[in-house]
Image (cartoon, grey):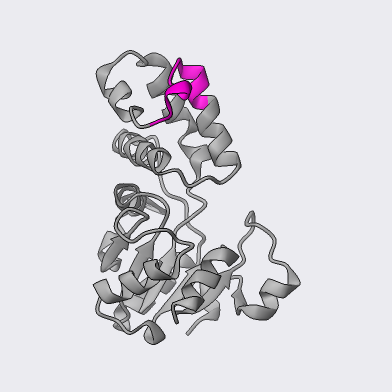
């Protein structure tokens, strides 16, 4: 089984949607409901809330309330046709190859399950978009699985999909997640993509590192 970590959720692609919804509909009940779980001091006005979101994103803080807002914004943006999901060109064909070979594909992301479903429903394709959700057997986030930095989360996922930890491969771009998954007994590979945090020599010595999914069988 392969478990992929879906991160770098491309908040920059949702900036326009966020600005449109928050600035033009700040007093609307549905907008206020969306931001109800944000800290009170960040909800004084649209500019303050947006600044808080940008700060969390810049510091890569995986706040649950931010991820929930993200999921709702993605739903709006994708439904309106404003957003499409860009993937590296190797991803779709390799995932299809693994699926056809009988591998179980699962997503574990700090982005909400709702956001994941939206993300994979509208993947950029030559003909427009493709729905890749059928490739995945399950979706996990920090709500239904736990923190990505705790080994118990990976144990929980393996149990949920009825797979032994030693027979699971976890792909991630985050060295701390790699440590947690490895502590759980999951074989872990770091994916070094353009724009990701640099991987130091110690990390590269500890974990196998690939640049493309095509490097894997």
Residue 191, quarter of picture: bottom right
Quadrant location of the N terminus in the rendered image: bottom left
Asked if residue 108 is positioned above or below residue 22 in the image, the reply reads: below
Query: Is residue 42 covered in magenta?
Result: yes
Query: Is residue 94 covered in magenta?
Result: no
Front-most of 32 and 213? 32
Residue 100 in the figure: left or right of residue 150: left
Residue 91 in the figure: left or right of residue 199: left
Residue 24, quarter of picture: top left
Front-most of 142 and 73? 142
Measured as percent of width and height from the top left, residue 2 is found at 39, 76
Asked if residue 145 is positioned above or below residue 178 in the image, the reply reads: above
> Disc count in the image?
0
Front-most of 148 and 25? 148
Magenta span: chief secondary structure: helix
Measured as percent of width and height from the top left, residue 23 is found at 43, 17
Residue 72 visible: yes
Taking the spot 42% from the left edge, 23% from the top edge, the residue there is 40
Asked if residue 100 is positioned above or below residue 45 in the image, the reply reads: below
Taking the spot 28% from the left edge, 60% from the top edge, the residue there is 133
Front-most of 217 and 187? 187
Taking the spot 31% from the left edge, 52% from the top edge, the residue there is 113
Measured as percent of width and height from the top left, residue 182 is found at 50, 77
Residue 135, quarter of picture: bottom left
Measured as percent of width and height from the top left, residue 204 is found at 68, 75
Residue 173 visible: no
The stretch in magenta equals 38-50
């Amino acid at each position: 089984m392969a478990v992929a970590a879906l991160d770098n959720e491309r908040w920059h692609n949702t900036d326009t949607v966020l600005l449109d919804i928050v600035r033009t509909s700040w007093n609307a009940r549905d907008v206020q409901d969306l931001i109800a779980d944000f800290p009170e001091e960040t909800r004084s006005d649209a500019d303050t809330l947006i600044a808080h979101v940008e700060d969390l994103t810049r510091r890569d803080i995986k706040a649950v309330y931010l991820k929930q807002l993200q999921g709702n914004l993605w739903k709006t943006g994708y439904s309106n046709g404003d957003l499409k999901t860009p993937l590296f060109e190797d991803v779709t064909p390799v995932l299809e190859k693994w699926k056809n070979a009988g591998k179980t594909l699962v997503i574990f992301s700090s982005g909400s399950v709702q956001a994941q479903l939206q993300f994979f429903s509208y993947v950029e394709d030559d003909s427009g978009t493709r729905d890749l959700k059928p490739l995945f057997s399950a979706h996990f986030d920090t709500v239904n699985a736990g923190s990505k930095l705790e080994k118990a989360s990976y144990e929980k996922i393996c149990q949920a999909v009825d797979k032994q930890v030693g027979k699971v491969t976890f792909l991630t771009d985050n060295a701390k997640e790699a440590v947690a998954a490895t502590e759980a007994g999951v074989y872990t590979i770091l994916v070094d993509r353009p724009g990701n945090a640099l991987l130091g020599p110690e990390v590269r010595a500890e974990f196998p590192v690939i640049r493309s999914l095509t490097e894997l069988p």
